[in-house]
Amino acid sequence: MEQIIIAELKNSVPSNPGEYSVCGQISGSVRKQTRNGNPYYEVELCDSTGSIKLKAWQDSAAFSQAESLNGNEWVKIQGHWSSNEYGIDARDWKLSNLEEEEIANVLAGTEETKSKQTEDYNYIQSVCESLSDPRFRAICTKFLDRFGDRFKRSAGARNLHHARRGGLIEHVAQMIRSAEGICSAYKNLNRDLLISGVLFHDCGKMWENTYPKDGFTMPYDFRAELTGHISIGAEIVNTLWRETESESGEEWELIEPSSEKARIHLIHLILSHHGKIEYGSPVLPKTPEALILHHIDNIDAKIEMIYQGYEEQEPPSQEVLSKVWALETNIVRPLEKYYTSSDQVEPNDH
């Protein structure tokens, strides 16, 4: 039986249903009832590439196994996988426990994922080190030194976009690439401020959407639930700024614009990055850098959602796929790029 990861399962099963095995961590097993009152379990399995839910019906061998699950078990699930109008599910599935070495391999993620996230983190680090303003450079590098490990295992969101271990790194790196491109087109933007804003805009998600060192089950954090990632992000920046300012002696006092003004502008980027009061921002974007940050954040999140939709949504026709909830519409496959005979075509190039 072929063993694949969850992302491959989501991509392959709609067109190639069949026997597969998937390894991961159980994040939940919830007892539910059908319309007729018959019990069943909904079991969620996670790996480094995502999560998937499957049903354990009362008349199946999996029902008793699901009944004994507490959550956080490391398992291999084998069964016949197919898709229907409710998504991907397995028939006649059963699970077995993983050995320690197998758990370590699943936790480490695929080679492709590890390579991409390492490259993204190194890129973030190098751009931060290139900042001209010594104040922004100092707090960005201090942040990475202090929180780098937690940053690497955090998600960009719980459900909608970059909702995976390390997803926050991918989101921030891609936003920095966009910011760099925009700064090259609009020369009057404050690049140091914008890059710093990108790094810190979602840093509160290291509490709101972080994973433990040894698992894929994202907990709900007391502090994050009561205060939210925007206020946590502002608190982190204020703390780092005050610490670094006190360490700098008189150096920061001689820089113009003033350090207090620079700090307030950076805090504004964090507070306004959702773009609207009703979306959670306590203030609206009021500077060029704040407007740019809001839009590149929105662009990267929605591009992630639409490409994820191409892999996961049911296709009512050859070109059209069913509605992505967060995009509020059906999605349509993109127009393929035009290549000349001399062009090198990369697989899945977009």
Image: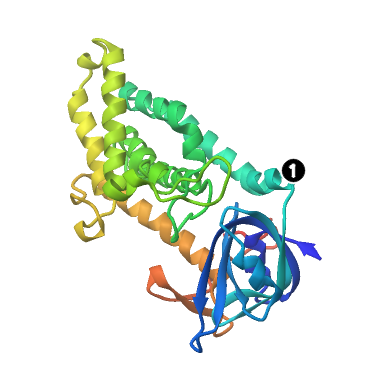
Q: Is residue 244 left or right of residue 330?
A: left
Provide residue 41's location: percent of width, then percent of height.
56, 72
Image coloring type: rainbow
Q: Residue at x 46, y 48 (%)?
A: 171
Disc 1: which residue: 101
Q: Which of 290 and 314 is in front in this view?
A: 314
Is residue 218 something that shows in the picture? Answer: yes
Where's the C terminus, which quadrant? bottom right
Q: Nearer the viewer, residue 212 or 330?
A: 212
Is residue 292 something that shows in the picture? Answer: no
Provide residue 321's location: percent of width, then percent of height.
52, 78
Q: Residue at x 24, y 48 (%)?
A: 272
Q: Nearer the viewer, residue 47 or 305?
A: 47
Assign a secondary structure to mark 1: helix
Where's the N terminus, which quadrant? bottom right
Q: What residue type is labelled 1?
A: Glu
Provide residue 15's location: percent of width, then percent of height.
68, 77
Vertical relation: 197 (above or below) 344: above
